[in-house]
């Protein structure tokens, strides 16, 4: 049986004009060919990020679709289908309906999903908050361990890398296996959601988890690879069943003749659907870092932040750094936490090599494959702006 | 009317060389270009595969660009005269165009006196100049800056390059027909393709205004 | 036999026409380059716009810190670490944490074992 992993999520189709625009964009040189020669993707080293796809001038690259599977589940009266959507989706989905990039269509998105027949409409942002709780605490433990505080010897080494980007994870596994102990053990929000949906939520809703289907709407093609990873079965079932990209959701909405622009405002369902602003900014480069800092600062200092924004980690330069002074109440001192934000996986090698050589000054490093963050992911609406 | 005996030197050896170089380049570029667009295996075979065909296309393009550039530098006076001729349109040219020089069977009429190039050739001159500029402007980004330019710009270059090729191939086909096949116009064939000379009899009738301004060496 | 040739020399008008064409070509090339540069800038404008959209949305939200999300706190108190909010609890480890690379087969075995025991 050929699995999705074998086929590869990203495929070159017959429209390839061999213009060679994509090879420069690929972080792993997985897509290759000479000019004039139809390009091919080496599925072994492809990290499924889809950057080649959204940048191809001729639309000659496709991502494998699970739309039919989702339709099947929605049509099946036996199945209880729940949906989560990433932060980045809500400021790009509108583009498929003529709105400007960045327009917030969150509430229309919820309504559209209900009209499509999802039994519960949740939000990946809930799980992003969960990720901060888990990963933030993990970071604190690693810091305590590094400082020699007793009781934290089991903690991993510093610096800690974020783990929510599945393209980054595959890159590390393929190319830098020695960096793996540095990567946070926390799952991505998508996967945390699935695990919690089929256990906690199923319990609360009195639904048999065997009948629950978890669908996620993502700005990302690598999430399709991620949901199929064999280890994501902690709930006792496949934690996340299917992934739709923002583009595919728009396609479904159009196929069902839903007048998206005139939809009423909707909201997410209880238990695992509530978002915070910290979760919302997960979709931009520096957002995970800032969300983590908002929580880590308040937990460690046991004080409320005067200023909630950490503008120092914002921006679009590929490698950014900042030092955040965090007062740690239990230790009675201020810790200068050195953080690094990488956007665009082509720029991560130096950072990794510094860590492996023991000369990295950072304590926490956020890595996102896509330049600008998930908002510019391989699953987002494809732009052809000329002016 | 009495027959004018003798011959006219119409195109210098430099001009003829440049024309040959450009012609051969155009054939190679057109052939490989067609192969790319329509994925033609037989043509790929001649060049040793699509990647090789692309390599040949690009380097032939360099010669296609450099050839005229060098010619213009070394023959600036000839080039300037050429531009002057093809940019002068008089009533005689308009009239010529109305009947297409008498070359079309059902469009007959008096063909007015023409310059070194007839009105049709003047238009072709512009078509080739504009066409080649477009090839060069769109072609080199597709090769040298294919990574740097935006996807939309790259696609735009491909589109313009393609339509330019369609128009130019058709124009060159027409030009070839008149230059080498049509029983009247092919009388000038040798002037560009071999010796550089054309019969004085021919020029005195077909390029009267130019002929009347020539110097006679006995 | 008589040979006819063109007269020598060019007029000023002819020179300027030649030079003029070269100049116009250079200008056209410049315009084309500018179009390319403008198109490049425009092609990336959407990224900042989407980024800005999310930060704006964050500013509008009532809850802006993860540890203040009441549903998160309820999840911990009711399920992940009953009675308390304790990230990295055993249940949290089981459901919300993972392993990478060569450690995965062992993790899969553990998870399958866990399922088996739970069943």
Image (cartoon, coloured by chain):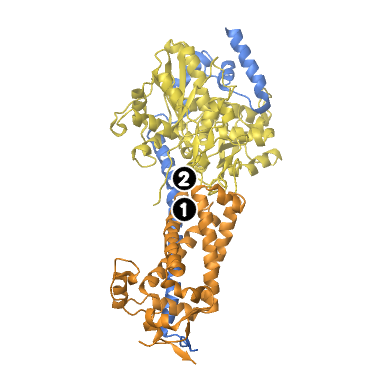
Chain colours: A yellow, B orange, C blue
Mark sitting on residue A354: none
Q: CA distance from mark 1 to mark 2?
A: 10 Å
Q: Label 2 marks which chain's residue? A: A
Q: Are marks 1 and 2 on the same chain?
A: no
Residue drawn where x is 51% and y is 44% of the image? A16
Q: Position of residue B180 (x, y in %)?
A: 47, 68
Q: Is residue C68 visible?
A: no
Classed neighbour count for the residue bearing mark 2: other residues with Cα under 10 Å, few (<14), some (14–19), many (≥20): some
**For this rendering, which residue is in front, B8 or A132?**
B8
Residue drawn where x is 55% and y is 78% of the image? B13
**For this rendering, which residue is in front, B205 or A61?**
B205
Q: Is residue A49 above or below residue B20?
A: above
Task: Look at the numbered discs 1 and 2 and tell me whether their residues touch, using CB distance below 8 Å.
Answer: yes
Q: Position of residue A37 (x, y in %)?
A: 57, 47
Q: Secondary structure at mark 2?
A: loop
Residue that sits furthest to the bottom in the current view: B218
Residue that sits furthest to the right in the current view: A357
Residue that sits furthest to the front in the current view: B2
Q: Is residue A212 above or below residue B182?
A: above
Q: Secondary structure at mark 1?
A: helix
Classed neighbour count for the residue bearing mark 1: other residues with Cα under 10 Å, few (<14), some (14–19), many (≥20): many
Q: Position of residue B25 (x, y in %)?
A: 54, 63
Mark sitting on residue A58: 2
Location of the N terminus of chain A by quadrant is top right
Q: Position of residue A382 (x, y in %)?
A: 43, 41
Relative to C108, B199 lies left or right: left
**For this rendering, which residue is in front, A210 or A7?**
A7
Q: Label 1 marks which chain's residue? A: B
Q: Is residue C80 visible?
A: yes
The residue indicated by pointer 1 is B158
């Amino acid at each position: 049986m050929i699995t999705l992993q074998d086929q590869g999520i990203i495929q070159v189709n017959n429209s390839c004009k061999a213009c060679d625009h994509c090879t420069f964009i690929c972080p792993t040189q997985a897509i290759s060919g000479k000019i004039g020669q139809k390009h091919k993707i080496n599925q072994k080293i492809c990290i499924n990020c889809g950057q080649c796809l959204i940048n191809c001038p001729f639309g000659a690259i496709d991502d494998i679709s699970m739309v039919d599977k989702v339709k099947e589940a929605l049509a099946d009266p036996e199945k209880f289908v729940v949906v989560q959507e990433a932060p980045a989706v809500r400021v790009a989905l509108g583009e498929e309906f003529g709105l400007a990039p960045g327009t917030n269509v969150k509430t229309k998105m919820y309504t559209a999903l209900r009209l499509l027949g999802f039994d519960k409409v949740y939000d990946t942002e809930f799980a992003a908050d969960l990720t901060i709780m888990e990963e933030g605490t993990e970071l604190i433990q690693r810091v305590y361990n590094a400082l020699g505080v007793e009781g934290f010897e089991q903690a991993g080494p510093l610096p800690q890398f974020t783990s929510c980007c599945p393209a980054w994870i595959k890159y590390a596994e393929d190319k830098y296996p020695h960096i793996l102990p540095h990567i946070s053990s926390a799952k991505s929000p998508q996967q945390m959601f699935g695990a919690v949906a089929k256990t906690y939520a199923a319990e609360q809703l009195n639904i048999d988890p065997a009948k629950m289907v978890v669908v996620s709407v993502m700005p990302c093609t690598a999430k399709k690879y991620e949901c199929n990873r064999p280890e994501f079965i902690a709930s006792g079932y496949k934690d996340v069943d299917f992934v739709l990209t923002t583009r595919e959701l728009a396609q479904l909405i159009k196929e069902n003749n839903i007048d998206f622009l005139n939809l009423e405002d909707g909201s997410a369902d209880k238990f695992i659907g509530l978002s915070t602003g910290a979760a919302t900014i997960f979709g931009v480069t520096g957002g995970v870092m800032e969300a983590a800092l908002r929580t880590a600062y308040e937990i460690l200092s046991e004080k409320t932040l005067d200023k909630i924004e950490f503008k120092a980690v914002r921006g679009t330069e590929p490698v950014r750094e900042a030092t955040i002074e965090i007062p740690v109440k239990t230790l009675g001192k201020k810790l200068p936490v050195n953080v690094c934000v990488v956007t665009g996986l082509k720029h991560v090698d130096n950072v990794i090599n510094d860590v492996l050589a023991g000369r990295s000054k950072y304590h926490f490093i956020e890595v996102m494959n896509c330049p600008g963050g998930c908002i510019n992911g391989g699953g987002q609406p494809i732009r052809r702006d000329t002016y | 009317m009495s027959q004018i005996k003798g011959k006219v030197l119409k195109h210098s050896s430099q001009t003829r060389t440049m024309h040959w170089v450009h012609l051969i380049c155009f054939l190679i570029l057109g052939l490989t270009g067609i192969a790319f667009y329509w994925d033609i295996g037989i043509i790929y075979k001649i060049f040793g595969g699509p990647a090789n065909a692309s390599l040949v296309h690009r380097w032939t393009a360099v010669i296609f660009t450099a050839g005229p550039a060098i010619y213009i530098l070394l023959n600036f006076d000839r080039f300037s005269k050429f531009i002057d001729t093809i940019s002068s349109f008089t009533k005689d040219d308009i009239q010529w165009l109305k009947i297409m020089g008498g070359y079309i069977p059902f469009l007959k009429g008096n063909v007015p006196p023409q310059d070194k190039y007839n009105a049709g050739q003047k238009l072709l001159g512009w078509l080739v100049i504009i066409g080649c500029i477009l090839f060069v402007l769109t072609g080199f980004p597709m090769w040298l800056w294919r990574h740097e330019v935006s996807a939309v710009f790259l696609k735009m270059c491909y589109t313009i390059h393609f339509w330019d090729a369609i128009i130019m191939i058709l124009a060159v086909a027409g030009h070839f027909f008149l230059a080498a096949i049509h029983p009247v116009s092919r009388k000038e064939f040798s002037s560009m393709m071999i010796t550089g000379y054309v019969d004085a009899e021919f020029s005195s009738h077909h390029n009267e205004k130019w002929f009347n301004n020539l110097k006679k060496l006995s | 036999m008589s040979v006819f040739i063109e007269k020598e020399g060019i007029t000023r008008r002819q020179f300027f026409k030649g030079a003029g064409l070269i100049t116009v070509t250079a200008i056209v090339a410049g315009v084309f380059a500018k179009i390319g540069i403008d198109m490049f800038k425009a092609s990336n404008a959407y990224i900042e716009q989407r980024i800005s959209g999310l930060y704006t949305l964050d500013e509008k939200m009532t809850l802006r810190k993860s540890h203040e999300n009441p549903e998160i706190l309820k999840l911990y108190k009711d399920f992940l670490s009953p009675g308390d909010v304790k990230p990295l609890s055993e249940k949290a480890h089981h459901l919300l944490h993972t392993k990478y690379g060569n450690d995965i087969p062992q993790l899969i075995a553990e998870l399958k074992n866990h399922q088996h025991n739970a069943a």
